[in-house]
Amino acid sequence: MAKETAAVQATVARAILRDIRHTPQKARRVVNLIRGSRVDQALATLKFAPQAAGQDVFTLLNSAVANAKAKNPAIRDASELWVIEALVDEGKTMKRFRPRAQGRGFRILKRSSHITVTVSDVKANNKKGATK
């Protein structure tokens, strides 16, 4: 059995989108829809997602698929791949000020995020999500 697992190497490809102007909270809503699913189903979900971050994650997922095809030419299309990891991290926060009454200024925080998508041709076992 050890020989079989050593002989089969999983192709893992990653794509990262940095400093995208979506708040991490709103981007996580979109990324949670595709985590753990097949890539072709994830692309269909993202194509019709009403959230603004859906278009950017759709492009990012296509980039991850292209990276996987470049690593392993035996992969024919997106139906052979799984989304094994999808993360949203907080990026830079731009601080701006908005004029208010009586000469005051209120701070406006314009948040950004880093989105990482990892695809593989083998479905990963989710040990963190397993419950009792």
Image (tube, rainbow, N blue to C red):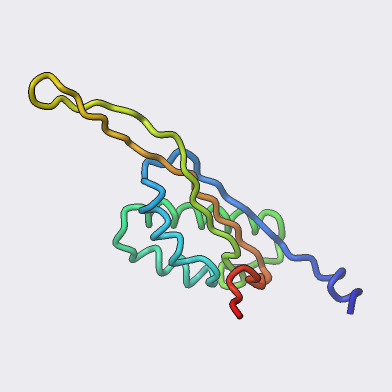
What residue is rendered at 65% in x and 64% in y? 120
Residue 123: quadrant of the picture? bottom right
Q: Is residue 68 left or right of residue 100?
A: right
Return the residue nearer the eye: 119 or 92. Answer: 92
| Residue 47 x %, y % | 37, 63
Quarter of the image that includes the N terminus: bottom right
Q: Is residue 14 left or right of residue 105?
A: right
| Residue 111 x %, y % | 37, 39
Residue 80: quadrant of the picture? bottom right
The residue sitting at the top extreme is 103
Return the residue nearer the eye: 118 or 131. Answer: 131
Return the residue nearer the eye: 72 or 51. Answer: 51
The residue sitting at the right extreme is 3
What residue is rendered at 40% in x and 34% in y? 93
Identify whether 2 is placed above or below 32.
Answer: below
| Residue 15 x %, y % | 57, 50
What residue is rendered at 86% in x and 70% in y? 7
Quarter of the image that includes the C terminus: bottom right
What residue is rendered at 53% in x and 54% in y? 87
Identify whether 119 is placed above or below 41.
Answer: above
The residue sitting at the left extreme is 102
Identify whether 66 is placed above or below 111.
Answer: below
Total number of numbered labels? 0
